Image (spheres, rainbow, N blue to C red):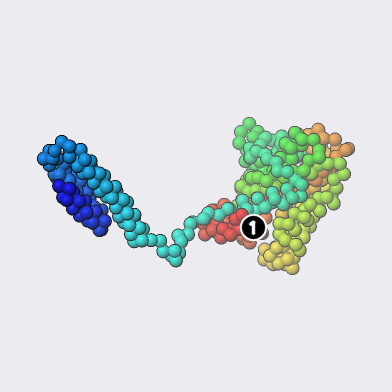
Amino acid sequence: MKEDLKRILAEAKERILTTKSLPDLQNLKSSFLGKKSELSQLMMKLRELTPEERPAFGKAINDAKGVLDTLITKMYSRLKDAEINRQNKDMSVDLTMPGRSLNKGSLHPLTLVWREIEDVFISLGFEIAEGTDIEDEFHNFDALNTPQDHPSRNLADTFYVENKQLLRTHTSPVQIRTMETHEPPIRIIAPGRAYRNDKIDATHSPVFHQVEALYVDENVTFADLKDTLNQFVVKMFGPGTKSRIRPHFFPFTEPSAEIDISCVGCGGSGCRICKDSGWIEMGGAGMVDPNVFEKVGIDSEKYTGFAFGLGMDRIAMLKYNIKDIRVLFENDLRVLKQFRNENR
Ligand code: FA5
């Protein structure tokens, strides 16, 4: 029986170590360790031995089973690893294949301009202020020294909501709201939407965007206004771009002016964009009228200030050579996709 055990063990080791597949290994396991295996049959024959011989031989059979079981476990993990490696090799990644490109979105040109304007003014020491799109007559007109019979109050120009509430016609009411709640020195810009009952054309939209600026302190002069505008224009449109101020009238500034910049299309020599004038209108400006200071309780003997309001849609149009303001509101993907590389 001892010889049988030796032979079974040797044969089993040999076959387990040379097996090539997991199913074959599974078969070997049941044929060498299963109920009908030769080792199990040897166990049955224990009773043919003397009581003295039985324990030692029983242990020898169990040891042999233990050896085979360990060997099968080792072989199992070796064959499993080999199979995983083979599968990985079959599905291996071709590093030379071009990647799948992601469809990246882009920021709207107005958002780009809006952010850039904020950056420029922050670099000049201004803070960002916010107002509301729905305003009351006091902040949009009365406090801005606008007479009761001023044409801009007309239904044909202003969208009224109810109870003397309206969609703000410019960003200037943010001047009032800021001066009501802050003591000078004040140095803010307020970018945002404005609404007017204007006819739509290439440069006018009923919903548009302005950026308001207000600087109030002791000894603020018209020269500060010109200098700030010049710095803004150069930072926004590049060196060589000039700003120009023409006399105008606004109820809330005195003196008042209109702001032009030298045409970015032709550099000032005259072209189709500037209608051969060399200049493009950007917005209005002026020194804060003492009547406005009075409405918000600021001492006009002590303080002076300048304010201006620029059309942000016009700035975006000039910067990105957009010929029609409607392009900014249509959200045509063919247009928007062109701004991918501009995104920060
Ligand atoms: C004003 O709105 C004044 N509040 C500006 C101001 C502020 C003057 C502070 C003095 C002190 P105006 O109506 O000119 O001004 O508008 C300013 C700019 O807004 C225009 O030059 C233009 O660029 C833009 N704008 C006005 N209406 C429209 C519109 N319907 N569509 C597109 N842009 C417009």
Which residue is found at the position 55% from the left and 54% from the top? 106
Residue 14 placed where, x, y %? Answer: 23, 56
Residue 216 placed where, x, y %? Answer: 81, 42
Q: Is residue 220 left or right of residue 274?
A: right
For the residue pair 12 and 271, the one nearer the viewer reads as 12
Element at label 1: helix
Q: Is residue 142 left or right of residue 304?
A: left
The quadrant in which the C terminus is found is bottom right
| Image quadrant assignment for residue 166 | top right
Q: Is mark 1 within 8 Å of ligand 1?
A: no
For the residue pair 192 and 73, the one nearer the viewer reads as 73
Number of on-image labels: 1
Q: Amino acid at mark 1?
A: Met
Q: Is residue 153 left or right of residue 41?
A: right
Q: Is residue 174 visible?
A: yes
For the residue pair 339 and 316, the one nearer the viewer reads as 339
Q: Is residue 274 left or right of residue 217?
A: left
Label 1 Cα neighbours within 10 Å, binned few <14 / some 14-19 / many ≥20 = some
Q: Is residue 141 visible?
A: no
| Image quadrant assignment for residue 167 | top right
The residue furthest left is 48
For the residue pair 134 and 19, the one nearer the viewer reads as 19
Residue 185 placed where, x, y %? Answer: 81, 40
The residue furthest top is 163
Which residue is found at the position 17% from the left and 46% from the top? 39
Residue 209 placed where, x, y %? Answer: 65, 48
Which residue is found at the position 66% from the left and 59% from the top? 319
Which residue is found at the position 70% from the left and 50% from the top? 119
Where is mark 1, residue-wise?
A: 317
Residue 127 to residue 258: above or below:
above
